[in-house]
Amino acid sequence: MTPEGNTNDIDQLNSLLRGELSAVETYEQCIEKMDDDLMKRQLTSLQASHVTRATKLKSRIRAMGGEPDSDSGAWGAFAKLVEGGAKIFGKKAALSALEEGEDHGKKDYADVEDLTPEVRHFVQTVLVPEQQRTHDSLKTLKEQV
């Protein structure tokens, strides 16, 4: 049973989880598009960071008595459409689609005022630094293409 006070935290963490699941899916589509082995390895590393964050979010949600979402939801469907179009137009467009997702993730992680202090601390100290790293790394990759 979910304690009443945790409902908002669990809902927000599930929203962040859906974003991470969407990122994993979108990176997978982009990695499949790439023909440059170095670029594939770099993108796979960024994807792994999103997998790790999704795992941490699932664990935290379970520890709070919640049930983690299992799919990326509406954002995932939108990301698939964007990335599908990017596949047609090339590497730069695919990286732009990933960057758009990273920007969206940064905004999601910045919106934590409604979380309880303990959960906000988890998000800000465990998840946000990795989100910033993947965002910045992707931006650098895109500039190199």
Image: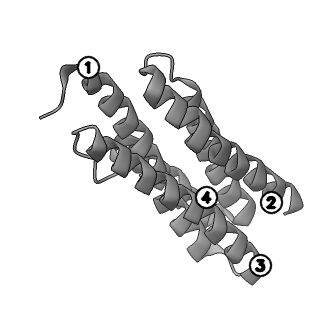
In the image, 127: left or right of 55? right
CB atoms at circles 3 and 2 under 8 Å apart?
A: no
Between discs 3 and 1, the one toward the N terminus: 1
Q: Position of residue 120 (x, y in %)?
A: 50, 27
In the image, 95: left or right of 25? right
Q: Nearer the viewer, mark 2 or mark 1?
A: 1
Between discs 4 and 3, the one toward the N terminus: 3
Q: Nearer the viewer, residue 6 or 92?
A: 6
Secondary structure beneath dot 2 equals: helix
User: What is the spatial separation of the Cα atoms under label 2 and label 4, in whole angstroms?
Assistant: 16 Å
Residue under numbered circle 3: 38
Residue under numbered circle 4: 86
- Residue 116 to residue 12: above or below: above
CB atoms at circles 2 and 1 under 8 Å apart?
A: no
User: What is the spatial separation of the Cα atoms under label 2 and label 1, in whole angstroms?
Assistant: 42 Å
Give me the residue at 63% from left, 45% from top: 131
Q: Nearer the viewer, residue 30 or 20?
A: 20
Between discs 2 and 4, the one toward the N terminus: 4
User: What is the spatial separation of the Cα atoms under label 3 and label 2, in whole angstroms?
Assistant: 11 Å
In the image, 132: left or right of 56? right
Mark 4 crowdedness (10 Å alpha carbons): few <14, some 14-19, many ≥20: many
Q: Nearer the viewer, mark 2 or mark 4?
A: 2
Secondary structure beneath dot 1 equals: helix
- Residue 122 to residue 42: above or below: above
Secondary structure beneath dot 3 equals: helix
